[in-house]
Amino acid sequence: MALWKWILAAAVSLVLAALAGLSIHFRPDRAIRVATGAVAHLICSKTFVSGLDPQTVFAETLERPGFRQLRHVMNFQIDKKAGTVDASTLWLFRSHATFHEGFGCVEQLGTKAPYLLKNDVEALKVPKTPPLLPEIAGPDVVEPTDPALKAALDHAFEELPAPPFRRTRAVVVVRDGKVIAERYAPGIGVNTQLSGFSLTKSMINALIGVLTQQGLTSPSLPAPIAEWRRIDDPRREIEVEHLMRMTSGLDLDETNPGFDPSTQMYLYRDMSAFAVNTRMIAPIGARFHYSSATTQILARIVRDLTGGPEQTLAFAWRELFNPLGMRHVTLEFDGSGTLQGANYMLASARDWARLGLLYLNDGVVGGKKILHPDWVDFCAAATLDSDYAAGFFTNRSDHPNARGRVARGFPRDSFFASGLLGQRIVIMPSQHMVVVRLGHSIDPTGDIRGVARLVKEVIAATQP
């Protein structure tokens, strides 16, 4: 290491030691560990699951706000044979992620080894009956024949001359149950599994919907969390719907500077245990604030209701992925064996579109009601005065964000799954259409204007 880095590392260590007495939410060492953990995990997943170049992943990740300040002092090492990635800042705050075939990547947090699932994933992918959802496309990329559709894809993949770059990776347009247009960036194909980030929250919504349809839970029931059951604990009044709508009142607000509790959840081997053991800071149901940690509590509920880690994975394949014909999916779990329901599902763009079709078709697939009746309208209805619904963002709202999207071309009845860096599954019932856009846009809005233009142009191209 260069002498200046040794000096800087020593200075950082002294400063952090002096600050160690601060509240855990405001300790810079914890924020840096969040960053190194995310870098290790993302390089691991995007290299070993998506097949992307690790150096490119590293460079693009460090362009993001919150990481940008560390780009000159962060480094990583990858062992492709062992399937491991290590990331550190000034050779401190080391984070380690390991790839396990079929299960993606998991971080090593603390001295205890992470829980490793024992399922035969390939066997889970073999359905006992044919998929309920008819095939949406053949094996080849569906090139649009309509000039207007082709122009819409051209515009979606246009790159800006300077940052923030859009970096569109994949676009899939499905109308009346069939892919009518799609395009992929170089190195990406129809079966490439791409990170959905918070699109994963919408998948958790679907699992809760299946469990509700099967009578195992309901949004109106108190959340089945053992830690909240004491008679004097106000959290015992939190219902499943409050978690779905992020109105629980728990101290789990997400602001993403690396210091907020929802971000620091990723420092824990058992992320949901961290989340459920937080205090109340607002009345239940009175206040919305976006919170990944709240969705992680829902992931724990799925784990408990299905019977454990292996049962969670089997349930997801049996009840959701196989009926929808989803084949190229990886679910990642935390070190305790709980699905990382807020952030870490990877799937092909077509498979993300298949998830959207479940909601476009009102939860019915092949004549079978997979989701509870009225589930889709319930999940697309705005929460309080926000443009968030339940696991989705919605345009069925008077919030300025929703009105702005409608003005740019989103149908009023549309709603969408949304993930970091511009991942979108736009569901448009009035158009019988689902549009998926995946990429790596560091625009603070996730290139929502570009997505709105795509939506507006594909609607115009498909009008009679």
Image (spheres, helix red, strand yellow):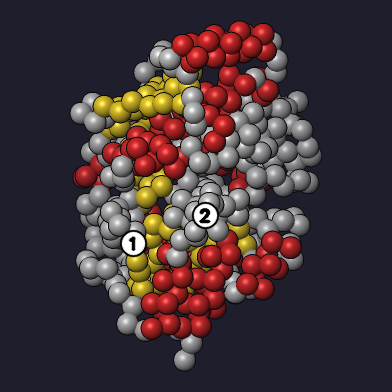
Earlier-in-chain disc, 1 versus 2: 2
- Residue 257 visible? The answer is yes
User: Which quadrant: the N terminus?
Assistant: top left
Residue at the far front in the pictured view = 3
Q: Position of residue 434 (x, y in %)?
A: 46, 69
Q: On the image, which quarter does residue 127 sit in?
A: bottom left
Q: Is residue 109 above or below residue 40?
A: above
Residue sitting at x 53%, y 29%: 70
Neighbor class of circle 1 (other Cα within 10 Å; few <14, some 14-19, many 20+) is: many
- In the displayed structure, does residue 325 sit left or right of residue 358? left
Any mark on residue 162, and which? 2
Tag of residue 184: 1
Quarter-of-image position of residue 121 = top left
Residue appearing at x 69%, y 61% in the figure: 401
Residue 413 picture location, percent across and down: 61, 72
How many badges with numbers are in the image? 2
